[in-house]
Image (cartoon, helix red, strand yellow):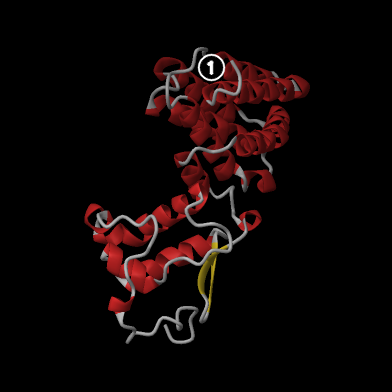
């Protein structure tokens, strides 16, 4: 690792000099994770801690010796975890100064993994609104394009997904996967390469908001008819209705989420 951002961590450092003052670290962490998955699990743990506010923007993380000794993991696993977080814009490492949490505006919130981590915390109302505003910007437009460009194969894929959603409900893993399949088929039907690049982020937003709003109890309404209305508008190539139906679907999903958070009655 010569010349890397980790050169400030000398190999001959006296590890005993570091009391295990590592904040939210869990000493049982190592025993719970298979060896080959350590760096991913550690990135997840640190990422969630950052999102929870355990490490604030600008704060320096415990260094690799502290993490490695307290969690009984290799220093290479720590370094790989930091690379994962750096790629998501959540941390930056510099020689001699260590690894710091970056400003929130630099975080890649639309990274599907970061979205997953966000919903493992208790996301605030502002974040939920931001996410649904993004959906309102992209999904009605995608539905309108799909109404113009869909093929029979797209319609069949959406219809199959709707059948599974109706049979399994969004309270089941199969039903939630079918919901994702519906949205994926719709984005694909829009036949827009730039929009398609957002599909994994849109899918993650749909998936984790759906799970989140049902974390305490099942939905008190059936969202399948909303999806069916979008499908039927796309099937008959009604651009305006497809846009309107998708906007209504997203707004209703937002209301469901706000109710689950106690924001709306």
Q: Is residue 257 toward the left or the right of residue 170 in the image? A: right
Left-right relation of 172 to 192: left
For the point 47% across and 67% down, the residue is 83
Q: Position of residue 4 (x, y in %)?
A: 48, 81
Q: Position of residue 233 (x, y in %)?
A: 68, 19
Between residue 262 and residue 155, name the one nearer to us.
Answer: 262
Classify residue 42 as left or right of residue 134: left
Placement of the C terminus among the 4 image quadrants: top right
Identify the residue at horizontal 41%, vertical 67% (top origin).
Answer: 80
Identify the residue at horizontal 55%, vertical 22% (top origin).
262
Residue underneath mark 1 = 224
Q: How many marks?
A: 1
Above or below, 78 against 97 in this view is above
Query: Where on the picture, by quarter, is residue 130?
Result: top right
Give the side of residue 260 with respect to residue 216, left or right.
right
Provide residue 255's location: percent of width, then percent of height.
61, 21
In this rendering, is residue 148 above or below 90? above
The local crowd at label 1, few if under 14, some if 14 to 19, many if 20 or more residues have their Cα within 10 Å, is: some
Q: Quadrant of the N terminus?
A: bottom left
Q: Secondary structure at mark 1?
A: helix
Residue 226 lies in quadrant? top right
């Amino acid at each position: 690792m010569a010349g890397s951002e980790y050169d400030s961590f000398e190999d001959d450092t006296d590890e005993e000099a570091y009391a295990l003052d590592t904040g939210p670290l869990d000493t049982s962490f190592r025993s719970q994770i298979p060896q080959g998955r350590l760096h991913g699990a550690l990135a997840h743990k640190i990422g969630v801690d950052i999102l929870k506010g355990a490490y604030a923007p600008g704060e320096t993380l415990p260094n690799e010796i502290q993490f490695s000794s307290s969690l009984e993991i290799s220093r290479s696993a720590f370094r790989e975890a930091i690379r994962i977080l750096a790629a998501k814009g959540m941390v930056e490492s510099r020689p001699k100064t260590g690894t710091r949490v970056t400003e929130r505006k630099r975080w890649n919130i639309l990274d599907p993994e970061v979205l997953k981590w966000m919903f493992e915390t208790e996301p605030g109302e502002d974040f939920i609104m931001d996410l649904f505003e993004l959906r309102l910007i992209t999904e009605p437009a995608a539905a309108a394009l799909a109404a113009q460009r869909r093929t029979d194969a797209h319609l069949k894929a959406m219809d199959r997904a709707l059948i599974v959603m109706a049979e399994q409900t969004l309270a089941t893993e199969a039903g939630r996967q079918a919901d994702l399949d519906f949205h994926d088929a719709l984005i694909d039907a829009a036949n827009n390469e730039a929009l398609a690049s957002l599909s994994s982020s849109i899918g993650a937003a749909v998936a984790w908001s759906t799970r989140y709003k049902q974390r305490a109890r099942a939905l008190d309404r059936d969202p399948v008819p909303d999806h069916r209305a979008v499908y039927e508008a796309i099937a008959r190539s009604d651009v305006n209705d497809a846009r309107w139906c998708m906007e209504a679907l997203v707004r209703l999903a937002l209301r469901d989420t706000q109710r689950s958070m106690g924001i709306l009655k």
